[in-house]
Amino acid sequence: MFKFLMYSMIDRFGKSLVPLFHSNPKNVDVDSLTIKGLRLHHARPLSIVHISDLHVGFQYNYHDLIEHIKIINKLQPDTVMITGDLFDNLEVFKENPHDYIPLLKTIKAPLGVYFSYGNHDQRTHLTHSLETVLTNSHITVLNNFGKYINYDGEDIYICGTDDILNASGNIEQALRNRKHLNDYTITLVHEPDYADFVKQFNVDLQLSGHSHGGQIFIPILGAPIKPSLGRKYLKGLFRLKYKKHSMYLHVSRGLGSTHLPIRIFAKPQITKIYIK
């Protein structure tokens, strides 16, 4: 009931704030952070650009994506990882999603671009159309699936789950192709709070989105609305322990928005992660 009332208030009064707080695609935080964990010594760290929650179709368009891909490519990452909610609602999407294929192909990452589904991706019977768009864009869909990449002689296992809320996300299935328990492992999971379950499986880094950093964040009070499985870990970097193992969790604030096309004290974010 509280959540319904909050959404009603935001919908009623928030529309007047749209001109003030509407996201400009160039007004994005480009953050960087460094973590340790690779098993071998390397001349330079592995670099990942993590993005999430574009919600293309809800006040996020082709031109916004052009600007953000420019930023991504300027960062020159080894790999790009997208943790869901690429499109907001394909059933009411006014454009043809396939028109985005040539643009998505321009993302430059020598070790590949990887994607896991979010709850908005899995709210429609047209999810198969999204998978076609991604595959034709040379983006690897990690849907309860994983594979190895080789970075400077080290095998790194990258996997992702299906959406946890609206589909059948399964970390155990995603880890089935992992050869050795000690291999450095990265998993893409849309909902961050699932990390409390994932941490027991010797995963080294979980990348998530979903929460938008609250999207509307009030100083001192925090975010008035937090989505299911995005309430405990709202934004930023966390270190979770399970017995003797530690797992990092990075929660992106995302690039798009839902419900209202505004962000307050929760700027869109692109993060470059260095792993030593």
Image (cartoon, rainbow, N blue to C red):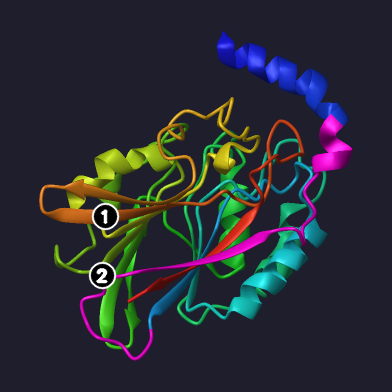
Residue closer to the observer: 152 or 88: 152
Does 264 sit above or below residue 259?
below
Residue closer to the observer: 173 or 157: 157
- Specify start and end residues of the magenta stretch as a single range: 17-44
Instruction: Mark yes or no: residue 38 visible.
Output: yes
Q: How far from the left and from the top, in percent, is residue 15?
A: 84, 28
**Mark drawn on residue 247:** 1
Question: Which of the two discs, 2 and 1, labels the residue nearer the N terminus?
Answer: 2
Residue closer to the observer: 103 or 252: 252
Relative side of 255 to 197, left or right: right
Q: How far from the left and from the top, in percent, is residue 46?
A: 39, 78
The residue depicted at 53 percent of the width and 49 percent of the height is 84
Instruction: Mark yes or no: residue 175 visible.
Output: no
- Point out the residue furthest to the front here: 220
The residue depicted at 46 percent of the width and 45 percent of the height is 190
- Point out the residue furthest to the top here: 1
Q: Quadrant of the N terminus?
A: top right
- Point out the residue furthest to the bottom here: 43
**Mark drawn on residue 37:** 2
Q: Residue 21 lies in magenta, yes or no?
A: yes
Hey, which quadrant is residue 203 in on the image?
Answer: bottom left
Q: Residue 75 lies in magenta, yes or no?
A: no
Secondary structure of residue under mark 1: strand
Does 116 sit above or below residue 164?
below
**Mark drawn on residue 10:** none
User: The residue under label 2 is which amino acid type?
Assistant: Gly
Relative side of 82 to 146, left or right: right
> Mark 2 Cα within 10 Å, few/some/many (few <14, many 20+)?
some
Residue closer to the observer: 142 or 276: 276
